């Protein structure tokens, strides 16, 4: 046993006070008259012995009271393993996942840990140094800045710059990468560490995994936004809302409740648009247990008009062309088949070929190459069609005209609603639906029939490796069919058109992305762009390659949310950049207290505190400096001595 304040033993002279009181007790006696003195001598002897024992016990309790009080003031302690080194370095984890609410607390983990740092600075102002995970100094009572863009825990750099630090206190949420990526340092017995994990059980979370757009071809004027949400751990009922940040308009809300570790895919229909600006959207998850990463940011760039080319020999096809006269969605160009410059085919998203008996080898080769590249090609025969080899090379086999005697009008078979082509066109087919009628013109084998006659002859067939080549078996004129006046005509043509359109993706990035690539038209090599978010302006490292802008973000300064990409020369906003918390920060991969105790159970250089509060830290540091304190126990013994004296005086006869 050692003593912090051995000078207190001078106070042991106070033991003389109860001894003197015991030796010099002046009593007053009363005279009692007895009628018979026969037993007086025996009674007197017995009372003397009883009083003597009682006084000795009282003396003993008083002496013990003084001794125990003096010992508590001398602050005795046992030497412990913790005394091998002192806690002199605190590392505060300020990565985004520490914004979660600490278990059993009302503040976030990082706020709670910062309060611990402030209290440590108050109590040990000369002995401690506090850093964040990037080795930057944490000032007492300063505002902690969450480093959203840099989630890596750089323990190697911290130890290298603080070689003299003997023992490190780690204040973190203990995500698994924090421990796993630094195991070599923790296993080095030349350094000592103290952990205080905030979780006894893994926390639950709900995160947006991905966002993408799928075309809704029912009317061609809407696109469907799909959202994939993942429950990590147990889930609750959560309200998911989608907002257009350009005009602060609420697009819609949906309720979702997932099973444990479940997945849900939600969809929101949003309007197509063809203006020059992109749109910014924000997803918000709102629930009682939702405390972190509740917002997800993404942009959708302008939906450029679909470029459609109509090629015909000489006849006009106004009825079909009217389908693509919506200037908001389409840019239609009509050309004569024999006069068109086929080297320009790749500029178009969809090519309609009204094919008769004229098609030279160059045009045939150019159209086949266009289709082979995955572009959408539609072949519509004219009444003088004879280009059978061309269709054969596109995947339509055994092409032949039907006999004129068989060119009777037949009804088309109802389409198969389970065919993926008809997704979003209709979900079910009415039994009494009147189908269009048509004459037979030609037939073939191969490909997949999307529409067919009741006698199984094809009417509309799709072929090609990418299902991008469509062919009608009948001229789409009033002479042959009423299909162009039927309700199926418009949605099917729209579906064909947009199946070849590569929709602009919902675009979003994460703060830990090393390089961000954005396609921007009409870029110039000398352009310099800056990122602006409210009052913050940044000029990141950047490269321009063609129409691609590559940005290397300054990790220490970047935040989640939207940034305007502004041309510094023209001051014009050319795009929006949506940045989100790193995905790894949202995943529920934490070490709980029991898991850490099991992981480091055989390592003497690591101490794991059982309670998540300042008292645990304070007690451990006190033990580090002064060993295991015993003064509290001696103070309790002093109080027990005082109680014993009271009991002896009260009940001992």
Image: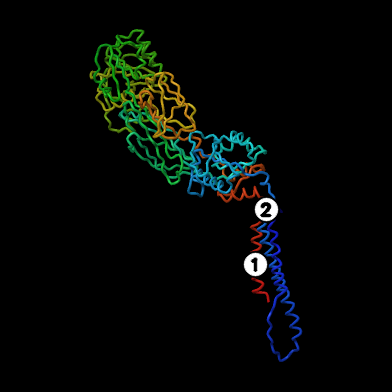
524 relative position to 645: left or right: left
Mark 2, secondary structure of its residue: loop
Check if mark 1's residue and mark 2's residue have beta carbons within 8 Å: no
Residue 336, picture quadrant: top left
Instruction: Specify which label sits upstream in the sequence, 1 or 2.
Output: 2
How did the renderer colour the structure? rainbow
318 relative position to 464: left or right: left
Task: Residue 305: give x, y in percent of width and height.
Answer: 32, 23
Does any portion of residue 595 appear in the rendered image? no
275 relative position to 19: left or right: left
Residue appearing at x 42%, y 33% in the figure: 536
Q: Which mark is residue 613?
A: none
**Residue wearing tag 2:** 4
**Residue wearing tag 1:** 642
Q: Which quadrant does the C terminus fall into?
A: bottom right
Q: Which quadrant does the N terminus fall into?
A: bottom right
Residue appearing at x 56%, y 47% in the figure: 120
Residue appearing at x 65%, y 58% in the figure: 73
Residue 599, picture quadrant: top right
Instruction: Name above or below for residue 15 compared with residue 335.
Output: below
Which of the pair 36/256 is nearer the observer? 36
Badge count: 2
Task: Name the front one of labels 1 and 2.
Answer: 2
Task: Residue 340: give x, y in percent of width and height.
Answer: 31, 11
| 3D distance between C-alphas at marks 1 and 2 | 25 Å
Mark 1, secondary structure of its residue: helix
Extreme-bottom residue of the structure: 35
Which of the pair 357/454 is nearer the observer? 357
Does any portion of residue 572 appear in the rendered image? yes
* Label 1 Cα neighbours within 10 Å, binned few <14 / some 14-19 / many ≥20: some
Task: Residue 237: give x, y in percent of width and height.
Answer: 42, 44
């Amino acid at each position: 046993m050692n003593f912090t304040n051995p000078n207190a033993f001078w106070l042991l002279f106070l033991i003389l006070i109860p001894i003197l009181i015991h030796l010099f007790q002046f009593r007053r006696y009363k005279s009692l008259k007895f009628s018979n003195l026969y037993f007086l001598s025996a009674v007197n002897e017995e009372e003397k012995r009883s009083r003597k024992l009682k006084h000795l016990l009282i003396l003993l309790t008083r002496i013990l009271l003084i001794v125990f009080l003096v010992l508590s003031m001398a602050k005795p302690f046992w030497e412990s393993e913790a005394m091998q080194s002192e806690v002199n370095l605190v590392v505060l984890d300020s990565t985004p996942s520490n914004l979660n609410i600490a278990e059993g607390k009302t503040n976030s983990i990082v706020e709670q840990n910062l309060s611990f740092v402030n209290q440590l600075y108050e109590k040990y102002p000369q002995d401690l140094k506090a850093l964040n995970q990037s080795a930057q100094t944490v000032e007492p009572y300063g505002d902690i800045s969450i480093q959203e863009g840099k989630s890596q825990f750089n323990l190697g750099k911290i130890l290298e710059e603080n070689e003299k630090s003997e023992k490190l206190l780690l204040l973190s949420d203990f995500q698994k990468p924090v421990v796993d990526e630094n195991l070599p340092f923790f296993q080095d017995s030349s350094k000592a560490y103290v952990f205080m994990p905030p979780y006894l059980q893994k926390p639950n979370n709900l995160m947006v995994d991905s966002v993408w757009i799928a075309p809704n071809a029912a009317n061609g004027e809407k696109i469907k936004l799909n959202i994939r949400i993942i429950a990590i751990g147990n889930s609750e009922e959560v309200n998911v809302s989608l907002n257009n940040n350009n005009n602060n308009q609420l697009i819609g809300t949906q309720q979702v409740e997932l099973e444990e570790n479940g997945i849900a895919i939600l969809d929101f229909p949003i309007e197509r648009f063809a203006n020059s600006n992109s749109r910014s959207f924000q997803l918000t998850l709102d629930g009682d247990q939702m405390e972190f990463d509740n917002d997800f940011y993404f942009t959708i760039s302008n939906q450029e008009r679909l470029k459609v080319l109509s090629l015909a020999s000489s006849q006009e096809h106004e009825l079909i062309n009217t389908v693509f006269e919506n200037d908001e969605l389409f840019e239609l160009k009509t050309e004569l088949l024999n006069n068109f410059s086929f080297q320009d085919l790749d500029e178009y998203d969809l090519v309609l070929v009204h094919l008769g008996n004229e098609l030279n080898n160059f045009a045939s080769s150019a159209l086949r190459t266009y289709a082979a590249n995955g572009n959408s090609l539609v072949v519509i025969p004219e009444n003088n069609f004879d280009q059978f080899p061309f269709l054969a090379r596109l995947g339509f086999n055994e092409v032949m005209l039907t006999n004129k005697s068989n060119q009777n009008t037949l009804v088309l078979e109802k389409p198969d609603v389970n065919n993926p082509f008809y997704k979003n066109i209709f979900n079910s087919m009415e039994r009494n639906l009147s189908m269009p009628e048509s004459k037979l013109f030609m037939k073939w084998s191969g490909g997949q029939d999307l529409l067919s006659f009741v006698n199984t002859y094809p009417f509309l067939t799709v072929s090609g490796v990418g299902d991008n080549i469509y062919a009608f078996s009948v001229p789409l004129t009033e002479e042959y069919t009423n299909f162009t006046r039927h309700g199926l005509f418009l949605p099917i043509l729209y579906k064909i058109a947009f199946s070849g359109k590569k929709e602009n993706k919902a675009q979003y990035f994460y703060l830990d992305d090393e390089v961000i690539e954005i396609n921007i038209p009409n870029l110039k090599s000398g352009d310099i762009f800056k990122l602006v978010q409210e009052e913050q302006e940044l000029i990141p490292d950047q490269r321009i390659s063609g129409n691609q802008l590559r940005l290397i973000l300054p990790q220490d300064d970047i935040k989640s949310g939207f940034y305007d990409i502004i041309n510094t020369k023209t001051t014009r906003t050319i795009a929006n950049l949506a940045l989100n918390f790193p995905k790894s920060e949202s995943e529920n991969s934490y070490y709980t207290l029991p898991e850490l105790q099991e992981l480091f159970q055989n390592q003497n250089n690591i101490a794991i505190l059982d309670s998540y509060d300042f008292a645990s830290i304070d007690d451990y540091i006190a033990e580090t400096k002064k060993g295991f304190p015993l003064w509290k126990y001696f103070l309790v013994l002093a109080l027990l001595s005082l109680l014993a004296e009271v009991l002896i005086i009260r009940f001992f006869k």
